[in-house]
Amino acid sequence: MPNVTFSAPTLDKDVTVYAVAGDAHTLLALAKKNGVIIPCQCEDGNCGSCLVKITVLGDKPPLAQELTEKEKLTLSVNGKLSKKLLDEAETYRHMPPHRLACQYIVLGEDILVEFSGEPGVEIELRR
Ligand code: FES
């Protein structure tokens, strides 16, 4: 069971929850289920409001849940996915840090999920 830690300026403190590996729920659904509010409007990969930054924790190679076609388009249009990052994702399965919570399926790895709390606004990197 992976740990998923949510971190945002809108939260009093980081929230770590246990996800069921292979449950096929989106990160947004997991957040909602645990009372973590990630801004979202369409919940279908079209608006970009649920922008999050994912960091895979631990020493194992990332499982690299691939970008959905909607993520590719929406992140690119919103300037969060460069051509270079897209090429790296498609060629080497190096996933970009910014993802859409409504499209990202939680896999069996520990992740840190950072978001600004404002729709579509990138969080400042804290490391
Ligand atoms: S809520 Fe619109 S892209 Fe995720």
Image (cartoon, rainbow, N blue to C red):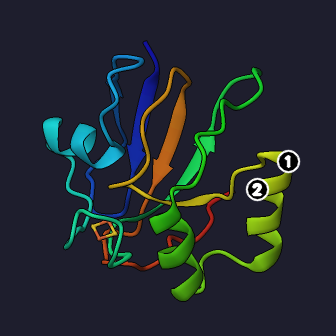
Eyeballing the image, is 93 above or below 42? above
Quadrant where the C terminus is found in the figure: bottom right
SS assignment at label 1: helix
User: Could you tell me residue 97's position as x and y percent?
Assistant: 64, 58
State which quadrant residue 19 falls in. top left
> Measuring 32% from the left and 55% from the top, which residue is drawn there?
102
Eyeballing the image, is 20 above or below 38? above
Q: Which residue is mark 1?
A: 92
User: Could you tell me residue 10's position as x and y percent?
Assistant: 27, 63
> Measuring 43% from the left and 79% from the top, which residue is drawn there?
121
SS assignment at label 2: helix
Q: What's the CA distance linking mark 2 and mark 1?
A: 6 Å
Q: Quadrant of ligand 1?
A: bottom left
State which quadrant residue 14 falls in. top left
State which quadrant residue 13 falls in. top left
In terms of depth relative to the viewer, which is nearer, 125 or 85?
A: 85
Dot 2 crowding, Cα within 10 Å, few <14, some 14–19, many 20+: few
Contact? badges 2 and 1 (CB < 8 Å): no
- In this rendering, would 100 be left or right of 87? left
> Measuring 51% from the left and 56% from the top, which residue is drawn there?
68
Amino acid type at mark 1: Tyr
Quadrant where the N terminus is found in the figure: top left
- In this rendering, would 28 be left or right of 2? left
User: Could you tell me residue 37's position as x and y percent?
Assistant: 20, 56
Which label number is shown at residue 90? 2
> Measuring 38% from the left and 58% from the top, which residue is drawn there?
8
Is the residue marked 1 within 8 Å of ligand 1, measured from its CB? no
In terms of depth relative to the viewer, which is nearer, 115 or 96?
A: 96
In terms of depth relative to the viewer, which is nearer, 55 or 82?
A: 82
Eyeballing the image, is 102 above or below 57? below
User: Could you tell me residue 16's position as x and y percent?
Assistant: 36, 30
Amino acid type at mark 2: Glu
